[in-house]
Amino acid sequence: MTDLPTDLTRATAAELADALATKTISAVEVTQAHLDRIAEVDGQVHSYLHVDTDGALAQARAVDERRQAGESLGALAGVPIAVKDVMTTKGVPTTCGSRILEGWIPPYDATVVTKLREAGLPILGKTNMDEFAMGSSTEHSAYGPSRNPWDLDRIPGGSGGGSSSVLASFQAPLATGTDTGGSIRQPAAVTATVGTKPTYGGVSRYGLVALASSLDQAGPCGRTVLDTALLHAVMGGHDPMDSTSIDAPVPAVVEAARSADVRGMRIGVVKELGGEGYQPGVRARFDESVAVLEELGAEVVEVSCPNFDYALAAYYLILPSEASSNLAKFDAMRYGLRVLPEGVDAPSAEQVMAATRDAGFGDEVKRRIILGTYALSSGYYDAYYGSAQKVRTLIAQDFANAYEKVDVLVSPTAPTTAFKLGDKLEDPMAMYLNDIATIPANLAGVPGMSIPSGLADEDGLPAGIQILAPAMKDERLYAVGAALEAALVDRWGGPILDRAPALGGAAAMKGA
């Protein structure tokens, strides 16, 4: 077994799992170490919206007792995790980063949360996010932005910036995310972490507060490809509570991550996901990563997916349309915030609803609800939403054609490194362009992964490479990702996250 770091928060989930299984350490020790880390640094990073100290320690003690009793436990039993605040957690606040759900305590767990509890992963708390997962920077959280541990003046990605920053600041070894248009992969890219969007339906959406039901997908986040695979194996699988859940075994993701072999694979570089608009340093690290894959024995070819050029426009019609329908449930009548209109003695239900939504929803949520309602309105449905769905079909066909020629596709994950907080808040289109490379996968339902590709020359900040595979072939992501990760770790002299300056690494942050 690999020697554990003295600071348990610097250990990988796989290392912690091995040490826990051999009783070298206890789940309580590991959980307490991460709770201490949260107390030390989260005031600067703001990764968490709620920390469940008592609940996490109780879950850890239960794992230790079961292990001492000789019970057979899951591979990750005792390894703590952070959960994105879009997943319902029984008895623990769930806000989706919105004031309209402030103080709501769900009466049930999401299926993913149930699986985590059954597998013995202590839940440290709920991570910050853009309100109802609408955003690419976590600046749209009603509770303030999370910050990138590489530079606290920069964004950690979105909507899952809380989950990515919690990993990059060593406040949890694992985290859950959700990906509607890139909200797992883009945050991973800008923080030098790993994130996977599984095949649509590969992980249950039951208990996941819906943004866009045909696009949303829960997935695993970690600091290494193997860690992410281990979590994927826990989260995935069929759920009869979710009508979109795939009734099939979880792909062999852990075995693929351990094999880390790309020899003989054909890898397609997507012509349309590069070039103009991509930061030179991001592009340089991507080109180097592709060259490494060739050195590892893969064959690299260029692939054209012409309809990807229309993905962004189609996505920003489909998503708002579905969001306007899904968010109609927040009506001030059933749960969450209720605001009474001023100066009205006996307000009607409509007046209470209007006052509550005005106070409870942020600007970005209102913007997308209005856009979606317009796109679905009488006389405009076919011109906007209907046309976007036709483009979606063409994009899915582009993927199908590409996968007849190659095993996986690759591109830069995001066009730039992390931008500064506030830089794009007043320009929604500039913000939306951050998802230009990740959106096609959600429209087609295929799986995708982002791993660190290195640091951009211009600013020394992380860049990511995206790997895309055919539906239900998620294991290919892990085989390619693990092989490339190992080669890049050798090239960079260690994990890229270890190179974080100033407030990036654990030891440095302790002195901040």
Image (cartoon, rainbow, N blue to C red):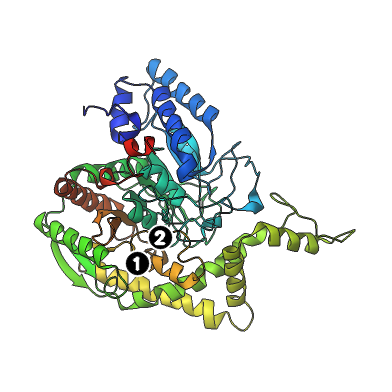
From the viewer's perspective, tell me whether residue 205 is left or right of residue 449. Answer: right
Q: Residue 24's x, y, as percent?
A: 30, 20
SS type, badge 2: loop
Q: The N terminus appears in which quarter of the rendering?
A: top left
Q: What residue type is disc 2 on? A: Gly
Q: Is residue 276 above or below residue 474?
A: below
Q: Most extreme residue toward the top, as rendered?
A: 69
Quickly name the residue at label 2: 182
Q: Most extreme residue toward the right, as rendered?
A: 345
User: Real-space Cα distance between discs 2 and 1?
Assistant: 8 Å
Which residue is located at x 35 percent, y 49 percent? 150
Quickly name the residue at label 1: 437
In front here: 435 or 406? 435
Q: Residue 109's x, y, as percent?
A: 55, 40
In front here: 469 or 419? 419
In front here: 41 or 249? 41
Quadrant of the rendered structure where residue 468 is? bottom left
Q: Residue 435's x, y, as percent?
A: 40, 65
Quadrant of the rendered structure where residue 366 is? bottom right
Q: Is residue 309 above or below residue 223?
A: below
SS type, badge 1: loop
Q: Which mark is residue 353?
A: none
Instruction: Check if mark 2's residue and mark 1's residue have beta carbons within 8 Å.
Output: yes
Q: Residues within 10 Å of mark 2 (few under 14, many from 20)?
A: many
Q: Residue 95's x, y, as percent?
A: 59, 48
Which residue is located at x 25 percent, y 46 percent? 499
